[in-house]
Image: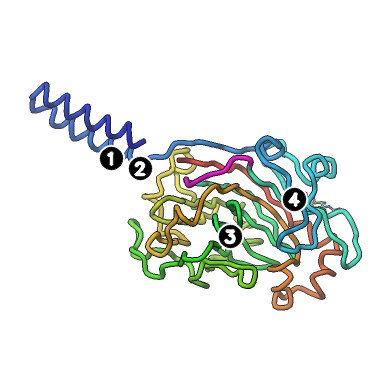
Amino acid sequence: MLTSAAFLLLSSFVLSAIAGHPSHNNLRARHARQAHRRDKSFTLTDKYVGKDFLDEGKWGYFTGSDPTHGSVNFVSQSDAVKKGLAFVRPDNVAVLAVDNTTDLSPGQNRNTIRITSTKSYNGGLFIADFGAMPHGCSVWPAWWSVGPNWPSAGEIDVIEGVNEGTVNQYTLHTGEGCNLARNPPASSTGSLAFTSKVLGTTCASSGGDNSGCAFLDSDTRSFGHGFNEQGGGVYAHLWDNTGIKAWHFARGEIPADITAGAPNPDSWPTPQAFWAASGCDIAQHFHDHNLVIDTTLCGDFAGGAYPQSGCPGTCAQAVADKTNFDFARWQINSISVYN
Ligand SMILES: *[C@@H]1O[C@H](CO)[C@@H](O)[C@H](O)[C@H]1NC(C)=O
């Protein structure tokens, strides 16, 4: 991008120097403006849609026990398809569901899905369009990315929440030395640097304290039932050497440049979350991330928060009752990666 912009700029100067005609000054100005725009434009590198989410060459189906101690069996791609937990609708929406057809006894694990992109990333602009996300008592969905040797290569949690939570949480987990800067410079399109409430500023996570540095959204359209009622929406995040920014756009408020496939984050409103490079050396703490979409049940977060969730009984009882999972499914319209 930089190279072609520099070339344009250079060629316009050369052109006007050779020609020496006044009208070429206008040409030069126009080229310079184009070069400036081109500097900030993004190129689509990957777009995942429909059957891509069933393609094991693109997304691996994780079948190990849940590292976050959820009461789940993560099923293989073939089991997910066979059991109707992963499928593509006629309108090309990919669905990843928690089993809602099996009665269990409290203490038994329920079938669900965790997929991880084969490709890994070292930054970019990620635009995820979901028609719906999972929610319900015991349910813990997440859209995130993670590097090797957790937490030293970082984790970026873009969508996360538990039980019948109504707002989204945005979190980073890292090794030692990365912090959320509370007062970074305001965004180019607003007076604030971010719109969400800061929950914690220490990104370093360990076995003992895994809360990370996080923001809590205040918009009830950002998570669960409220998100789904809008027909879902778009979560976009920009990971570059200035920091990591995350935006949520409800269905009716998606910027036209996103829909047009020419995203321009500079024109978007203040992000919901922003971890500025002033508090964290991004390149040092984040690298080689695989993208992950999963839904687990109970475990460290949904189980820990269950007593305060307003849900009845125990988390294990919720897992046993199949009627809790009719809304525990991702509807994925697309995931696009730009660089
Ligand atoms: C499971 O959930 C889906 C989606 O909400 C619903 O259409 C289906 O009827 C449910 N299955 C059962 C057995 O209730």
The residue to which callout 1 is attached is: 36
Please identify the quarter of the rendering in which residue 141 is found: bottom right
Up/down of 31 relative to 134, above or below: above
Residue sitting at x 53%, y 44% = 121
Q: Secondary structure at mark 2?
A: helix
Q: Which region of the structure is painted magenta?
A: 118-125
What residue type is disc 3 on? Pro
First of labels 1, 3 by sequence position: 1
First of labels 1, 4 by sequence position: 1
The residue to which callout 4 is attached is: 113
Residue sitting at x 50%, y 70% = 202
Q: Secondary structure at mark 4?
A: loop
Mark 2 nearby-residue class (10 Å; few <14, some 14–19, many ≥20): some
Residue 313 appears left or right of 38: right
First of labels 2, 4 by sequence position: 2
| Tag 2 and tag 4, C-beta contact below 8 Å | no
Q: Main secondary structure of the magenta part?
A: strand
Q: Secondary structure at mark 1?
A: helix
The residue to which callout 3 is attached is: 151
The residue to which callout 2 is attached is: 40
Q: Is residue 122 magenta?
A: yes
Up/down of 41 relative to 317, above or below: above
